Image: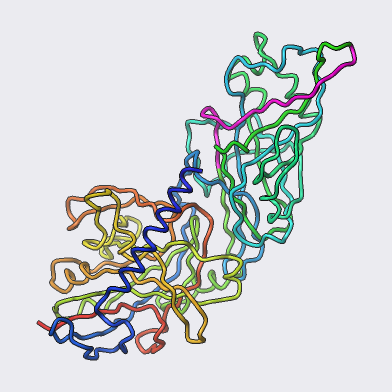
Amino acid sequence: MKNRNLALLFIAIVATVAIVFSACKKINESTELGGNLIPPVDNINTFDTSLTVQAFNDTFGLANDTLYLARNQEFFLGKINSDPFFGKTDARMFLELKPPFYKFNYLDRPDSLVLDSIVLVLDYVETYGDTLTPQTINVYELDQANNFRSDTGYLIRKNDLTYSTLLGSRTIFPYTLNDSVKAYKDTTVNQLRIRLSDAFGNRVLDFDSIPNGAFASDSLFKKKLKGFALQSVGSGGAVMGFNLTGVNTKLAVYYRYLDGGGPASYDTTVTYLSFNSNCAAANFIQRDYSGTPLLASINNNPATPDPILYIQGNPGTFANLKIPALAGLSNRVVHRAELIVEQLYDISDSTYRLPDFLYLDAADPTIAASNYKFRTIPYDLTFSNTTGALNLGTFGVVPIRGIDAFGTPVQKWHFNISRYVQHVLNGTQSLYNLRLFAPFVITEQFGTPPGADQIVGVSVNQSIVKGRARLLGNNGPLDTNPHRIRLRIVYSKL
């Protein structure tokens, strides 16, 4: 899949940049924090201090959902019933599959066609979560009352599509989806195949292109078949990603026809209805945090910072960050200012892996929360003159490897906000609240300096749904844990 390859290339590039960048820094990160003098840099006395970062967990509610999926992006299906920290996820898919053109026909022997089987096939990409727990996938026919359109976008947190007629069902183990299949004229890998009922198959086999037949036009086809809904029911520990535009996504109609060798001489063939430019698609993702530590932290005293942060990919969660001590800090020359956040490891991280990237943006706290307009970090996120892309790699979205207090390998993020902090200390920039999260894509304000802003789209992670992390917050100004979330500033006095 072309978009996936580009995303992997992007990961490799930004990871390389991050490694080189961290290796070439003159400032020693291992220096003990707390305002101490550190070895001179270029014969300048350089100091190091860290400021307390107050962090507060929150979730993206339905009212804040503005995320739509394009047709060529990864869609998800499945259930997670028991993530110990993030609860439940229910991912459902809706799609149309249609003939490649109108008017369309089966083989020109309509009176002699005999159904063998009808199979819904999906182009499998990956699994996020527990691959060993079986899942039962039901396929339903969308009700005719739905207004399901290819020219309409559908929010991932909202489900207005209805369905009631069960067409087929299959119980699968997610780890088997990349196995080879052996079907008539189809021996590829990476498929989810669900056989549908013969009654439905015979109905589809009766489609034709005579004056008012289903294959005569798109409008007539939609009156016969509105589309499909796929839902995982019962147990589940994973969501599975699919490429709707891939060659393996199709409705395969296997049938026999008279081959001309006699009244009982039949041959077998297959006709495919595929996902093409006339097809609609929607992905509904429902999160349920009931009974989780995440929800308990949100329901705690809202004025008390959270010692543990819970970050989950779209549609998911975020942390609001405040650094009040920065407002009272005297002016100085900032060599580097970085927001440092570290993973709090749990064994479940091996099943529900971390987001590929985290992201940091800002909002003016003097504006009412209902009117917040989030923006890129001023001065530190800029567009490259050569590529036209934001400098996400050097900004710090890519994690680097670290070690926690118990010697366990963990991931750390160092967000470079040096220029923003320098402007705050100079008095030329307002102090903003920050937001830490793991978005797929986000649209927000950009301007360096703020003022003549423009709206930009920022692509961060490869897809929705995947990735979650527990990160270390802190217990307030007296928290001395060296792994807590913090703003580290390396500076020289004026």
Position of 450 relative to 3 (above/below): below
Q: Could you say where residue 430 lies in the image, as x and y percent from the top left? A: 20, 66
283, 416: nearer the viewer: 416
What count of labels does the image hold?
A: 0
The color scheme shown is rainbow
Q: Which residue lies most toward the top here?
A: 211
Q: Residue at x 58, y 23 (%)?
A: 100
Q: Could you say where residue 218 lies in the image, as x and y percent from the top left? A: 58, 20
Residue 266 shown in magenta: yes
Position of 400 relative to 191 (above/below): below
Asked which quadrant contains residue 402, the reply is: bottom left
Residue 11 shown in magenta: no
268, 323: nearer the viewer: 268
Q: Residue at x 44, y 55 (%)?
A: 461
> Could you tell whether 248 is left or right of 322 in the image?
right
Q: Which residue lies most toward the left here?
A: 494
Q: Could you say where residue 389 lies in the image, as x and y percent from the top left? A: 30, 51
Q: Residue at x 75, y 40 (%)?
A: 182
For the C terminus, the image quarter is bottom left
34, 59: nearer the viewer: 34
Position of 312 relative to 71 (above/below): below
Q: Which residues are magenta?
A: 263-282
Q: Could you say where residue 470 lies in the image, as x and y percent from the top left? A: 50, 72
